[in-house]
Image: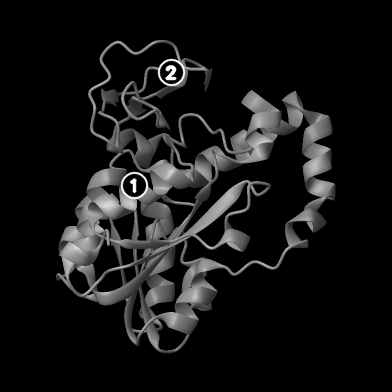
């Protein structure tokens, strides 16, 4: 492990304090993913601080380094992955932004971890794009894109950035390849619930720890990224985290196949919180 500043966190699903956990099955360079003693959720207990994520582990810095590492260590698997992308189109899939365009009511739409604002261009005209991005460089680029549509971008962690928006504000939210990165996933989901308008839709896409490919590839699975990916969701943990926050949850089979390395969850804020888990 580098000399990065770190912190310890409880399980983001059940909030169990896993003091002195047994060594994790998966990890690299001193970073490790452990299974919660109570609920079994696989996550990094020791994670980089928010400041480290901004300065040292920003996505635009770590992605090319990780891609090079994988190509060097596993050239055969890297070649196979690059040359068999057709497999991703065997079954028809609906992307989260397309789903929001079809089903969300007109109004402000949020992209958590918006990067440079690429998804903003995919939002339909009835959705006004807003974003939260922890990387300073990417947030500046995204802000220019959002401003063209009357939107805005907040440069902050998602937990802090959400506080800058009013409650019951967003009719749509996109969490695409984001929630696996955030060590405050539980707090973010509860805060997001408050910021969503009643009936608002959230599309969440995350790596699928329960996939058959993960079982086959083990520590070579494409979903493992250390220390970028701090949460490893399967269907059950994604459902529990969302329902605990108050959302109703749909996980369409064709968007969450066991053969797929990713899964899509569709969350709805009900008009009454007490009906969220009905």
Vertical relation: 145 (above or below) 186: below
User: How many residues crowd mark 2 within 10 Å: few (<14), some (14–19), many (20+)?
Assistant: few
Which of the labelled discs sits on residue 240, or is there none? 1
- Residue 26 located left or right of residue 220: left
Front-most of residues 4 and 48: 48
The residue carrying mark 2 is: 2
Quarter of the figure with residue 86: bottom right
Q: Position of residue 270 (x, y in %)?
A: 25, 71
Q: Secondary structure at mark 2?
A: loop
Q: Residue at x 50, y 50 (%)?
A: 206
**x and y, in percent, of residue 194 in the image:** 18, 64
Tag 1, which secondary structure? helix
Q: Quadrant of residue 88?
A: bottom right
Q: Nearer the viewer, mark 2 or mark 1?
A: 1
Q: Which mark is residue 121?
A: none
Residue occupying image coordinates x 52% and y 20%: 27
Name the quarter where the C terminus is drawn.
Answer: bottom left
Q: Say which residue appears at 25% left-offset and 63% top-offset.
A: 276
What separation in Å lies between label 2 and label 1 (alpha carbons)?
Answer: 33 Å
Q: Earlier in the sequence, mark 2 or mark 1?
A: 2
Q: Is residue 71 above or below residue 106?
A: above
């Amino acid at each position: 492990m580098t000399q990065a500043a770190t912190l310890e966190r409880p399980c983001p699903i059940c909030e169990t304090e896993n003091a002195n956990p047994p060594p994790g099955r998966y990890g690299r360079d001193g970073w490790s993913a452990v299974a919660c003693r109570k609920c079994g959720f696989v996550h990094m207990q020791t994670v980089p601080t928010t400041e480290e994520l901004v300065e040292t582990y920003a996505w635009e810095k770590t992605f090319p380094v990780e891609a090079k590492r994988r190509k060097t260590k596993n050239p055969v698997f890297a070649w196979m992955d690059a040359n068999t992308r057709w497999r991703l189109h065997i079954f028809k899939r609906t992307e989260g932004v397309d789903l929001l365009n079809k089903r969300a009511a007109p109004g402000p739409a949020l992209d958590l971890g918006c990067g440079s604002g690429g998804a903003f261009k995919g939002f339909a005209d009835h959705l006004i794009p807003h974003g939260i991005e922890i990387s300073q460089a990417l947030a500046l680029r995204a802000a220019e894109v959002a401003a063209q549509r009357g939107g805005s971008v907040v440069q902050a962690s998602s937990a802090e950035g959400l506080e800058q928006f009013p409650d019951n504000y967003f009719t749509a939210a996109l969490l695409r390849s984001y929630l696996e990165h955030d060590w405050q996933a539980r707090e973010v989901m509860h805060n997001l619930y408050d910021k969503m308008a009643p009936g608002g839709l959230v599309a969440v896409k995350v790596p699928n720890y329960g996939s058959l490919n993960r079982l086959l590839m083990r520590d070579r699975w494409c979903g493992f990224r250390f220390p970028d990916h701090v949460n490893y969701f399967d269907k059950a943990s994604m459902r529990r985290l969302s329902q605990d926050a108050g959302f109703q949850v749909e996980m369409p089979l064709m968007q969450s196949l066991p053969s797929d390395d990713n899964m899509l969850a569709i969350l709805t804020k009900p008009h009454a919180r007490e009906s969220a888990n009905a």
